[in-house]
Amino acid sequence: MRQARRVWIAALLASCAPLAAQNLFVNSDLDSSLVSWTMGCGTQMAWASADEAGCPGSGSVHVTGGPCQGQQGAGAGQCIAAGALTAVSAAGRVRATSGLHVVVFQYFFTPDCSGTMASQQVVPAGAASGNWTLVSAENVAIPGGTGSILVGFGAASNAIVEADVDAGYVGVRSRIFREDFEGDLGGSSAACRWSAVVP
Ligand SMILES: [Ca+2]
């Protein structure tokens, strides 16, 4: 009996550990607000009811870009603490009618993306088509000394550009898309939410 109880406690402790594929974004699907989301410099953002998968219970963020430090772009993302992370993968859905889809990583020494940006990495993710498009960047190395990372999705262009962003993910594992296999693993709301299930 005592041994069985120990095993049960061990199982409980294991279930409290962070999931290997845990999404470090909060409010990643933008169901009803912009909580936890922020934007790049020069950008304006607003919550929109248009969901990337057409789900009535979820929306997205619409961003309008402007000039910023000699560049043009429109994007939105979230700040995550770097902690002991050495590399991350990120993915999201972007819809823009012009420019180039991008995944952007901005690195800060501070723990909350404040202060001067130390460096950034812009990963091109194909030309905008006017349709919701999966954008991703896999296993991106984090520079040493990084305290926090602003991970964003959007569009870069030589002119004013607008974009819609939805379904953001960043984590130590590659993205897990609900369309891929969430239903097979017993997940619910498969068409509208990121998976929290680890394969
Ligand atoms: Ca959404």
Image: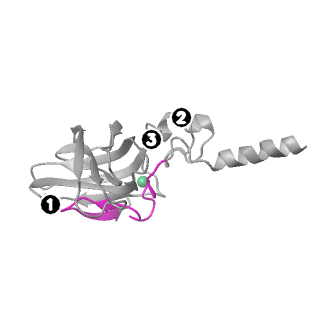
Inspect the image, locate mark 3, and give the three-letter code of the amino acid beneath it: Val
Q: Is residue 100 above or below residue 180?
A: below
Residue matched to label 3: 172
Across and down, in percent, residue 25 comes to: 43, 53
In the displayed structure image, the side of residue 26 where residue 142 appears, left or right: left
Closer-to-camera residue (193/117): 117
Identify the residue at image location x=66%, y=47%: 15
Quarter residue 139 falls in:
top left
Q: Is mark 3 within 8 Å of ligand 1?
A: no
Residue matched to label 2: 181
* Residue 194 drawn in magenta: no
Give the residues in magenta.
Answer: 23-47
Mark 1 → mark 3, Cα distance in angstroms:
32 Å
Mark 2 → mark 1, Cα distance in angstroms:
38 Å
Inspect the image, locate mark 1, and give the three-letter code of the amino acid beneath it: Gly
Ligand 1 image position (quadrant): bottom left
Between label 2 and label 1, give the one nearer the viewer. 1
Direction right: furthest residue: 1
Task: Classify mark 1: residues with Cα within 10 Å, few (<14), some (14-19) or many (20+).
Answer: many
Q: Is residue 174 above or below residue 59?
A: above
Across and down, in percent, residue 189 comes to: 56, 48
Closer-to-camera residue (63/106): 106
Asked which secondary structure carries label 3, the reply is loop
Between label 1 and label 3, give the one nearer the viewer. 3
